[in-house]
Amino acid sequence: MRKALVLFATLVLATSAFAVDLYNVATVDTGANGLAIGTRPASVAFNGADLFVGGSFAGQGITKIANPLTSPSIALQFGGPTVGNGFMSLDADGSMVVAATNNAGAADIAQTFDLNGNPIGATTGALTNGRIDGAAIDPGFVGGGGGGAGVHIGGFGTGYRKLYDPGLTTLIDGTALTWQPDLGSGTRDIAYDKTNGDMYMRYVNGVGRGTRVGDHNFARLDTGGAGMQPIVTIPDGLNSAINVGFLPQFNVGGIDVVMMNFRNATFENSIQLFDASGLNVLETANFLNADGSGAFAGLGTGGSGWYDFSYDASTGLLAVSDWTEEKIYFFAGAAIPEPTSLLLFGIAAFCLRRR
């Protein structure tokens, strides 16, 4: 981690005047003293209603948690047990769950399920250079009618977006370039802005953004050329479980930011936020309790740096999984005066997405 901290000092070109406030509105304990799901959380996906947690190593596959914001309970468990590192990637929308392992090509698998855990499709790493590194639901070119939607299966060194049908049997497109000279082709994680189809990828050398301009076309904001635009060029070695999340104007009057974790560090040192339209523009992140009266004190002191992110645009909520503490934290972009208000009025009334 010392190397990463040095790189922060030498590569970060600017610190934004903006600060991003994240208010902890709920926490789900998945460990032995909580829901006891049978494994530490490797990944997380939140679709606005249900929470899905991917199991790590040879533990339970996927756990669906109902009512995660108010009275969490295990609805069902499916897709397991996992092998190797477990389900390192997870994504969900209103009809499907996508899960993928990340075992450097050793028995890698990507699977799709409906929301009740029934299998839709499965594939091995043979489709992506013999390995799988990241999986996400691509909403398509939202502004152009939704063309180009499917399941994006990433592969370290592939250099192109591999988009498949939900059954994972048909390659829809493999022409969109994800290799970038400042970032390379060593990708680890994928996130999409579900409101417009923009793509964000975590590389071992940073984070890149592809602005959606067509069904299978992405462009750079800085040059207007095709491909991925570098947002962060700070490497984290060849670590696995390095992820990316996208937060569109999380606070009122805020800016679009990307969230990324660096391994082997505590929560506040591991998770960093950057301007999604700049280059190495670090944002100040303030993790607060629900009403904003003080710092959120529930993060613990674990130092694995293993976190995953899932933002739901319909509620404006961010879910963060913490492998060390065995918890899922929910953050909103606005303070809630009384936590009990979640029960009385519903979370959406306080946390509508700002655009």
Image (spheres, rainbow, N blue to C red):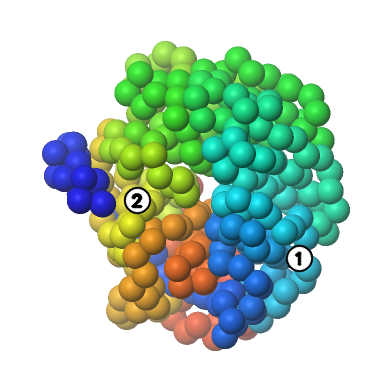
> Residue 100: x, y in percent?
65, 45
Viewer-proximal residue among 179 and 294: 179
Residue marked by disc 2: 262
Left or right: residue 164 versus residue 292 is right
- The residue at 54%/23% (across/down) is 158
Examine the rendered structure and indicate whether residue 351 appears above or below residue 185.
below
Q: Is mark 1 on a helix, strand or loop?
A: strand
Visible in this render: residue 204?
A: yes
Q: What residue type is labelled 2?
A: Phe
Which amino acid type corresponds to the residue marked 1 in the rendered image? Gln
Q: Which of 18 and 32 is in front in this view?
A: 32
In the image, residue 130 lies at what x, y percent? Answer: 62, 28
Q: Residue visible at 73% across and 22% down? A: 172
The numbered disc on residue 34 is none
Sequence-first disc among 1 and 2: 1
Label 1 neighbour load within 10 Å: few <14, some 14-19, many 20+: some
Determine whether 246 is above or below 153 in the image: below
- Identify the residue under disc 1: 77
> Within 10 angstroms of label 2, few (less than 14), some, or many (20 or more) residues?
many
Q: Is residue 77 left or right of residue 48?
A: right
Q: Which of the 4 quarters of the picture holds residue 75?
A: bottom right
Relative image position of residue 242 (x, y in whole percent): 43, 47
Res 45 visible: no
